[in-house]
Amino acid sequence: MELLAEGRTAEVFAYGVGRVLKLDRPEWNGLSVFEEGVLTALAEAGLPVARSHGTVTVDGRGGVVLDRVDGPSLLQVVTCAGPEEVDRLAGQFVALQLRCNRTTVAGLPDLLPRLHSEIEASIPDGGLRTDLLALLDPLDDGGRGVCHFDFHPSNVLVGPDGWIVIDWLTVASGPSDADLARTLVLWGQRSTGSLGRFLRAVRREGQAQRGLGNDRLDAWVRIVAAARVAEGFEGEERAWLLRVADGLERLFA
């Protein structure tokens, strides 16, 4: 099979006409079953995803068969775009994220308990941990829409029939504000060039569309950064996340 792309948890291969096979890496075997169920539910809810055509097993590795999307990632498009085009793309990106956030799908894991447990597990400073956990409940507006929680330009493909969102393994049900904060944290150190302009526009437009003030968004950024520490980062990346969690750095403001 022709290898088309690869990531931390899977490899993507060409698989017949108009389809791809996303094959779990051995150490992540089984994720495809979860993702197949999620993609089916999201497609039924009308969200722009690569439709699933079931699961298969290849050499003991599980995989999910998906529609093939021929087109560049949004990251590739943004990197080559001029300033006005970057701003337009950011507005379209925000609208797509909000479309997901305003859709409800039954059976998704609840985001808030995940964040709570990750902060408890990952923040060594007891005072900071207590402060962050005290922020979390008041920030919860009760919204339980679809949060991709890995929503960034590399996970949006610009296909011939529109934009398609991929890589849904982190999906949860939660507040829209948290999903925007996660986008900013994921690429929070990419502040220069076209991508920096894009992310500043995403923050600006994302706040405007949500009616979201700086203080509330910055609080969500602190929560999300603290929870991300639980993903096992070390060295400079861990130190940066802890500074953001402590409120010592603001992202794209």
Image (cartoon, helix red, strand yellow):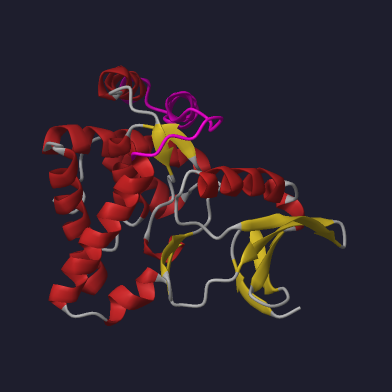
Q: Quadrant of residue 81?
A: bottom left
Rendered residue at 37%/52% (across/down)? 186
Q: Image check: 62 left or right of 144?
A: right
Quadrant of the rendered structure where residue 130 is?
A: top left
Residue 210 to residue 46: above or below = above
Residue 42 in view? yes
In the figure, 206 relative to 82: above or below?
above
Quadrant where the N terminus sits is bottom right
Q: Is 179 in front, or is 240?
A: 179
**Left or right of 172 on screen, residue 201:** left
- Which residues lie in the magenta part? 102-128
Q: Is residue 107 left or right of residue 239?
A: right
Residue 214 screen position, x and y as percent: 12, 38
Q: Which residue is depicted at the point 17% across and 59% down?
A: 201
Q: Position of residue 75 (x, y in %)?
A: 36, 71
Could you tell me which residue is drawn at 53 percent across and 55 percent down?
167
Q: Is residue 9 visible?
A: no
Residue 111 counted in the magenta span: yes
Q: Could you tell me residue 122's position as x and y percent?
A: 47, 32
Where residue 64 sits, quadrant-wise, is: bottom right
Which residue is at 20% across, 45% downward? 249
Q: Is residue 83 left or right of residue 164?
A: left
Q: Nearer the viewer, residue 229 or 18?
A: 18
Residue 91: x, y in percent? 21, 60
Instruction: Please tell me whether residue 93 belongs to the stretch shown in magenta.
Output: no
Q: Is residue 190 above or below residue 175?
A: below
* Number of callouts: 0
Judge by depth and name the residue closer to the eye, 47 or 234: 47
